[in-house]
Amino acid sequence: MKDWPLYEVFIRSKAGLHHRHVGSLHAADDTMAIEHARDVYCRRNEGVSIWVVKSDDIVANDPAESDALFNPAENKVYRHPTFYDLPDNVKHM
Amino acid sequence: MDNLKEKAFQDKIDQDTRIEPKDWMPENYRKALIRQISQHAHSEIVGMLPEGNWVTRAPNLRRKVALLAKVQDEAGHGLYLYAAAETLGVSRDDLIDQLHTGKAKYSSIFNYPTISWADMGTIGWLVDGAAIMNQVPLCRCSYGPYARAMVRVCKEESFHQRQGYEILLTLSRGTEAQKQMLQDSVNRWWWPSLMMFGPSDSDSPHSAQSMAWKIKRFSNDELRQRFVDACVDQARILGVTLPDPDLKWNEERGHYDFGEIDWDEFWQVVKGHGPCNKDRIETRVKAYEDGAWVREAATAYAEKQAKRKEKVA
Ligand SMILES: [Fe+2]
Ligand SMILES: [Fe+2]
């Protein structure tokens, strides 16, 4: 049999937190994907909310080109608070 | 070109940077991982069968719900692991086919029969115990999806071992017949559990490379020794004798010495001649085939729903 589509599963573990990728599973359709995600990834109250998305629908950057993508951020130290020198007697900043 | 890539890859491993699915990796690393992760997944799936044997005959409801939950966890472990293997470019269908046609291996421990209720306790204590010993270091494996799957698995395993040990504790405080059942069970499972760590380092062909790639962090013999050291006190509390006349504390090594494992038996079971090899695969294939109509119905329903949606849109 041909495999059912692959879904990626994201779980919010409690209100106030981000959904987080926990793994993947196969399902015939979206509804089954949610049901399987509950059974496979939430057997012990691990979640209060589930997102599933077909793996094919995820757009990702090419890791071979990640240098070009991420390196420009490396030499911009002035984007961090520690770049700025202030005397010790300046408080609450 | 590939040499340069391979060097960069090994550097990453040496610096403990995790490898992720789309990163470049040597073909042999990919192959070794597919082999190990899929064998691991198959072991979880086949591992449900010896215990499934006792679900309907658990002595009370408390034991029954615990055993059911444990077996269900093992199914979950199999699924996390199949998903991790698939990130390396194999299909689920192929993996399952390899198991059902006998091409793929799974842990030889599951080819032993479960003939008494005490075996449910012993499996939790020794078999899950040995699995934990093997799996904890895998949480730091160099391949990200495998390591993450192992973190989930390890969180769940400790309940498995404790529920098994509790079954044995109850038997150890019971009647003479119950104590005998406990001892008999430990006698049968002790040596096969030690075999779960695999051949000795000198006979383990893939070990050195797996260590260099940080798929494995400790050798088979090292983990086996830790397991023996941990079990001795636990056995004492149960009042059972571990069936090994050579088992004794070695002051100099700071470890327990133990007897020689029957490697002929190990290889016999690995090659398919254990007491239950045939039965396990037959049961597995039958379950898969009996479920075919459910999968077909779900596929047909999904297609129908998709068509209906198209019409509306
Ligand atoms: Fe497991
Ligand atoms: Fe387990």
Image (tube, coloured by chain):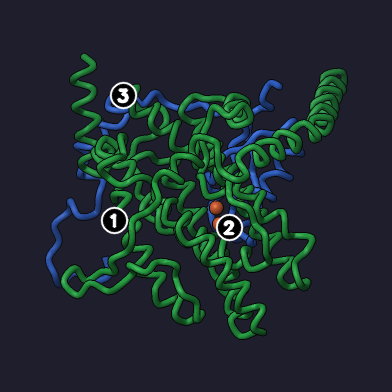
Chain colours: A blue, B green
Nearer to us in this view, A63 or B259: B259
Are the residues tagged 2 and 3 within 8 Å (C-beta)?
Answer: no
Does B209 sit above or below residue B93? below
**Disc 1 is attached to a residue of which chain?**
B
Task: Determine the residue positioned at 33% across, 56% down.
Answer: B260
> In the rendering, at what x and y percent does residue A49 appear?
66, 52
> In which image quadrant can residue B169 be found?
bottom right
Give, as a three-letter code, the residue at label 1: Glu
The residue that label 3 is drawn on is B26
Task: Determine the residue positioned at 64% across, 61% down.
Answer: A45
Mark 2 vs ligand 1: CB below 8 Å = no
Please indicate whether residue B311 sits to the left or right of residue B113 in the image: right
**Can residue A65 be seen?**
no
> In which image quadrant can residue A29 be found?
top right
The residue that label 1 is drawn on is B222
Q: Secondary structure under badge 3?
A: loop
Q: Residues under labels 3 and 1: Cα distance?
A: 28 Å
**Disc 2 is attached to a residue of which chain?**
A
Q: Are marks 3 and 1 on the same chain?
A: yes
Q: Residues under labels 1 and 2: Cα distance?
A: 37 Å
Q: Residues within 10 Å of mark 3 (few under 14, many from 20)?
A: few
